[in-house]
Amino acid sequence: MGIYEELEWRGLIKDVSSPDLKEKLNKGGMTFYIGTDPTGDSLHIGHFSSFLISKRLKEAGHHPILLVGGGTGLIGDPKPNAERPMITYEQVEHNFNCLKKQAEDIFGFEVVNNYDWYKDMNFIDYLRDYGKYFNVGYMLNKDIIRRRLDEGITYAEFSYMILQAMDFYVLHRDHGVNLQVAGQDQWGNITAGIELTRRKCGDELYGFTMPLLTKSDGTKFGKSEGKAIWLDREKTSPYELYQFFINSEDEKVIDYLKFLTFLPKDEIERLAESNRTEPHKREAHKALAREVITFLHGEDAYKEALDVSQMLFSGQIRDLSYDQVKSCFSNVPSVDVDEDLMILNALVKCGAASSNREARQFVKGGSVMVNGEKVTDEKFVVSKEHAFGNKVTVIRRGKKKYFVINHK
């Protein structure tokens, strides 16, 4: 099947600007762009599916450009219910440089910055050359604007649509871009850019959107324990990625395989059958974790994630590095101490036991491990000297309950 049909099968096409786009995508040769504002210094898993569409289109013979909005990022696109906090010029520049390197390293995209064409534009030129092409009624009819009118929307946010339309036009004029790809929440901005270009120079541009990746309850996919899942391994380790994907919802894992991997149709269908008939094997979840981690960080990172998971499952954590311990146990109960502690006091201090008496029962019963070693002597001392990196002691009580002591 052609690239258009593959994207359809994967559920990656929602809105299309023209019926002609199917033939154009299957033929190849378009120059397209996908954009993101530098609101952070790393992409997250929510960006990943749309960036993978760009990779798929590139392999089908199209040329991708990534726009990182150093200009639009200084304004911020309208959120559904509130204005985004503005960030400093310095932070935007830092974030741009980080995202540029990340996109080049992971995806191999050409990266441009819309600050380059906004920085020298004056207000009169903005109004004469672009503002006059936008009817206020047309702008008010856009979904995100309409939803914000009752609560209030600033002029800066209201103008964001014009800026993004300008991006499409400038990229067409200077880079030959004739297609924009984005998430479904950007449909209004895409059509604004198509209309602006038609009115300014008569050329026809194209666009399509993809559905947002969501959990079964409709919330956005890409957070665990309230934290974003980042593509930067310093922010989200391969182990954390593995745990995130291996614990994906059974009813959504096949969608995630279609969105986030390059596995072919027959293999995904096989995994769907396994997920339906033998869910306990978690084949689909394991394949999802393997494909994403390997794509982002390589085979060694995936093997590391498997090894760390196995060590944690068995309780044999002695060979973990300090950095691995930090990422593995970032969400378990922890306490800071500035002195050595007897094991009974340590268990009470970190919350593993409610009293010295209960702590003694746990120790004598053989249910306590410190840094992967079983402790049965109530005179055992938890010290900085034997901690991971001389900073972190990991206590396990029973089979699954972990606690962390941070040594100061």
Image: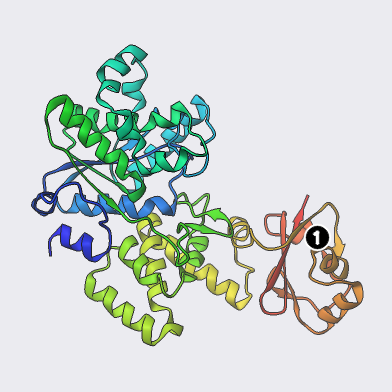
Residue 252 falls left or right of residue 67: right
- On screen, residue 203 versus residue 42, left or right, reads left
Whether residue 89 is visible to the viewer of this picture, yes or no, is: yes
Residue toward you, 11 or 50: 11
What x and y, as percent, mark residue 92?
A: 47, 30
Q: Is residue 274 above or below residue 150?
A: below
Residue drawn 63% across the image and 69% down it: 317
Residue type, numbered disc 1: Ser
Q: Is residue 156 above or below residue 408?
A: above
Q: Secondary structure at mark 1?
A: loop
Task: From this view, report whether residue 145 is shown above or below residue 307.
Answer: above
Q: Position of residue 202 (x, y in %)?
A: 11, 29
Q: Residue at x 25, y 40 (%)?
A: 191
Label 1, on which residue? 383
Q: Nearer the viewer, residue 349 or 198?
A: 198
Split into 4 quadrants, where in the image is the N terminus?
bottom left
The residue located at (37%, 19%) in the rendering is 119
In x, y percent, where is residue 345?
Answer: 88, 66
How many dots with numbers? 1
| Along the line of sight, the residue nearer the viewer: 115 or 308 | 115
